[in-house]
Image: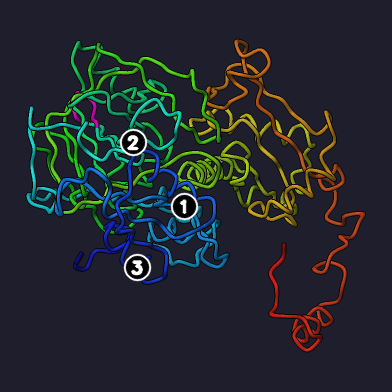
Amino acid sequence: MSTGNLSAALSLRTFLEECKAEGDVVEIDLEVDPHLESGAISRRAYETGSPMPLINNPKGKDGPDGLFRILGAPVGVRSDRATRYARFAKSIGLPSNATGHDIIQKLIASKKAEPIPSIKVHDAPLKEHKIFGDEIDLLKLPVPKNHASDGGRYFLTYGLHSVQTPDGKWVNWAITRCMVIGKRQLTGLVDVKQDIGAIWAMWKAQGKDTPWACALGVPPAAAVASGMPLPKFVNEPDYVGAITGVPVEVIKCETNDLVVPAQSEVVLEGTISANETADEGPMGEYHGFLFPTKKSPQPVMTVNAITYRSNPIVPIAVAGRAPDETHTVWALSICAEILDLLQQAGLPITKAWCPYESQAIWYVVQVDRKRLVEMKTTPEIFCRQVGEIVFSSKPGRFVPKIFVVGDNIDPSDLHEVVWAEATKSQPQDSDFFFVGNYPTYDLVPYATHGFNPHEPQAKVVRLCMLPAEFKTLDRPWIEASFRASYPEELKKKVLDSWLAYGFGENPVNL
């Protein structure tokens, strides 16, 4: 699967070649049933930090070159701590040993960089095979059913949807789930509070169906951009160029004027109905639950054409208990957005992180205490500022809980975050609630299944610092730990002599 000079960020196949060389791909040649088995393999890989499963022979695949192979856990994490975030890092042009904070800083830097417009090409491998109209039968394809209680077979869980405004000025690439409901029909979440739904509403207002395409197996950087809560009217193709430093190649669809990444594996083309709906759901969600009765009427998508390259690869995201793509790509993208917003507002916030264990519900921000003390502010005023900025924003819709920690706490280390919360967060007095005109996200389980689900949902900023930390840099306590309780020369001696003491290889902190 030669990919020429394309980087891992710009080609799924280069990405897989590099990951395979690092032992992070397992090719499965045994026949695998897309009915639950491929989902179970993927979930097991997510939850154990195992290599990505590339399923070469799913039951129902259309011959050696046909539709399609399945790639599970495309942006899961590795069990190796040093390269834990390698898949996300490679997706945006960073080395395999990049940290989570490196990834967030790259996303912010890309957002601030000059956009690099895409380049339109006229031929690409995805045009090798073409199917039109009644030749299409989605029901015969190896579309996976990922969880036993899912409402159907979900084809598009990590696909890039391409739509544009009726005037053609805004091209939006987005990730949203879709399930097969007929030979040429799908239905999926088209939320008018998100960009794809806002554009659909513009077409609907004109009494027209929305021209639509969905690309699968896209350049990894394009998938990342599609999963980010970017500001409205930002063209994702140009942002992909800012991430990679070079223009992303795009190609026109066969049946409409939309463009998709030229280095895609499979592309569906068609329309999103302005009026016809079908029940969508339920599906295992990012919060780790599946509510069997959760269905909703969503627009029907009709497929008029499928183009694909030989022996194509379709990545799937099997959402559930962390970490999967909803916690790596989506949650870390939200971290980048809220960190940028807080820093633009002049607040002394140095880092932001979403502990994967929180299922993309907790967001932790770290404070530069020197600047905090210089502000001469109070805990309440500061926390109110943080909450107002984040909760009023577009990404803030997805952020119900913010934890504020000092600069001695690494937000990406849950062990440290829990220590700070348990010892410094005082019930009631350290919690600052926000209720009212703040955008909320109803997929959080307690929003619809908790207390008073029909009333406005509260959001909270939880301060995990003591009041003294706002007044002076001289904390009235000393941390009782290896890092803080001993002279540097003694710590160095202990580390250098660890093996001589009779211990095994130098351990990592728990």
Point 38% across, 52% down: residue: 113
Q: Which residue is under mark 1? A: 76
Q: Quadrant of residue 243?
A: bottom left
Foreground disc of the pair 3, 2: 3
Q: Is residue 279 above or below residue 112?
A: above
The residue segment tinted magenta is 163-168
> Which residue type carries mark 3?
Glu
Going by the image, does 120 lie left or right of 24? left
7 inside magenta stretch: no
Decide: marks 3, 1 in contact (CB < 8 A)?
no
User: Which numbered disc, 3 or 1, marks the residue that appears first in the sequence?
Assistant: 3
Q: Which residue is under mark 3? A: 18
User: Which numbered disc, 1 or 2, marks the residue that appears first in the sequence?
Assistant: 1
Q: Is residue 115 above or below residue 169?
A: below
> Which residue type carries mark 2?
Ala
Point 87% across, 55% down: residue: 475
